[in-house]
Image (cartoon, rainbow, N blue to C red):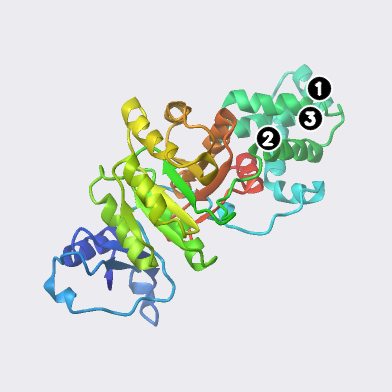
Amino acid sequence: MIIKKFQASTETEAIMLAKEELGKDAIVMNIKTISPKGIYRMFRKPVVEITAALDENITYKNDKVKSQSPAMPQRKQILPDIIYDDEPVNRQMFQPGNISSSAPSAIEAKLNDLQNLIEKQMNEKEKQGLEKDDVKSVEANKNLACIQLIYNQLVNNEVDEKYANQIIGEIEGNLKKDASMDNILASIYQKIILKLGQPKMIEIIGKTPKFVFFIGPTGVGKTTTIAKIASKFKMTEKAKVAFLTADTYRVAAVDQLRTYANILGIPLKVIYSEDEMLQAKEEFADYDIVFVDTAGRSHRSKEQRDDIEVLINSIPEDEREIYLVLSATTKYRDLIKITEAYSEILNYNLIFTKLDETSTIGNLFNIRMLTDAPLSYATFGQNVPDDITRVDAQNIAKQLLRGQ
């Protein structure tokens, strides 16, 4: 494995330098910004440094690189060959952490920003020269105004109006007329958490290897997500892990997964048919978990979906799990069509990627409600294995209610 560092004024330029020297098969492993130090730091701009890797089995673009073979760093951080330029969502909302108390006092503290916003908007509404009857109505029933503002907040965060109305309708009947703002917020907050449910995580149970299939459209980051999850099982749980890939349609898809496999020390097998899947099942019979990367094909093509379903059905139901990988940046209308296309594949779980590329996460809630499929993982950046975590219902609820 060849590993080199490249510096430039922008991330794009640094990646171009890496591709120019190492070739198009180079994989970006890490990206960081280096700020200048010393007395002249005010006059110098930060530079971007990337660490790139190339499998030694791949032909090099620059023969000079072939003789260099630095030691592998202890911390294995692998980055996909993708550049993200969009405004990021608040990354702290998706960092793993302790599950906090759901007591009203804790909720009040967490949602204090929204409460202040509601109070401010209600006060402004009274100052805008409304009719006296309107003002009296707001004063007489402030909880109704509060509910309306919370509803608007949910819709602004792209929660489908149907589901926002459902949440409001379910809590309105249980609220007292003189319910405080704290109680209203707490009720809606808890209702969202209940609807999101507990995340379904991948677990190793029993002695039979578990085959974990990753399905979904092109460009959502299935291969990188597999690398993130597999690296945690390999390094943290010391599990015996293998890779299978049926993604023989996308250019360099096999090479990308092979690079991850080489870095992690995981065997990789390419499969083209149901028979080869059965052969792989026998070959990896003594492994704990086998991750299967499927081709990212069009959800509009029934023939392509059928090919994936044949591979999945070659493994007994009690020995497999299926994860539908979706991008949080995809339009809700398209997400509906994608999930409808995969509706014949039962019992899948949901993974959402690219949360760092969107400012709203209403689609996570919408698709959870639409499909009733359990949420599982969320990814929010390029670093492997760091930028992935379990879906935290409390964090999502806070994000939907508070916004940015």
Residue at the limit of the structure toward the bottom, as seen here: 38
Question: Residue 400, position in %: x, y?
Answer: 61, 40
Which residue is the site of mark 1?
A: 136
Q: Residue at x 68, y 42 (%)?
A: 114
Mark 2 or mark 3, which is nearer the start of the sequence?
2
Q: Is residue 126 left or right of residue 5?
A: right
Residue 369 position by quadrant: top right
Circles 2 and 1: CB atoms closer than 8 Å = no
Mark 1 or mark 2, which is nearer the start of the sequence?
2
Q: Residue at x 36, y 30 (%)?
A: 306
* Total numbered labels: 3
Which residue is the site of mark 2?
A: 121
- Evaluate whether residue 295 shows in this view: no
Could you say which is closer to the camera, residue 361 or residue 151?
361
User: Alpha carbon of mark 3 to alpha carbon of mark 2: how far?
Assistant: 13 Å
Q: Amino acid at mark 1?
A: Lys
Q: Amino acid at mark 3?
A: Asn
What SS does tag 3 mark? helix
- The quarter of the picture where the C terminus appears is top right
- The quarter of the picture where the N terminus appears is bottom left
Residue 157 lies, with reference to residue 90, above or below; the image says above
Could you say which is closer to the camera, residue 150 or residue 27?
27
How many other residues sit within 10 Å of disc 3, few (<14), some (14-19) or many (≥20)? many
Could you say which is closer to the camera, residue 362 or residue 68?
68
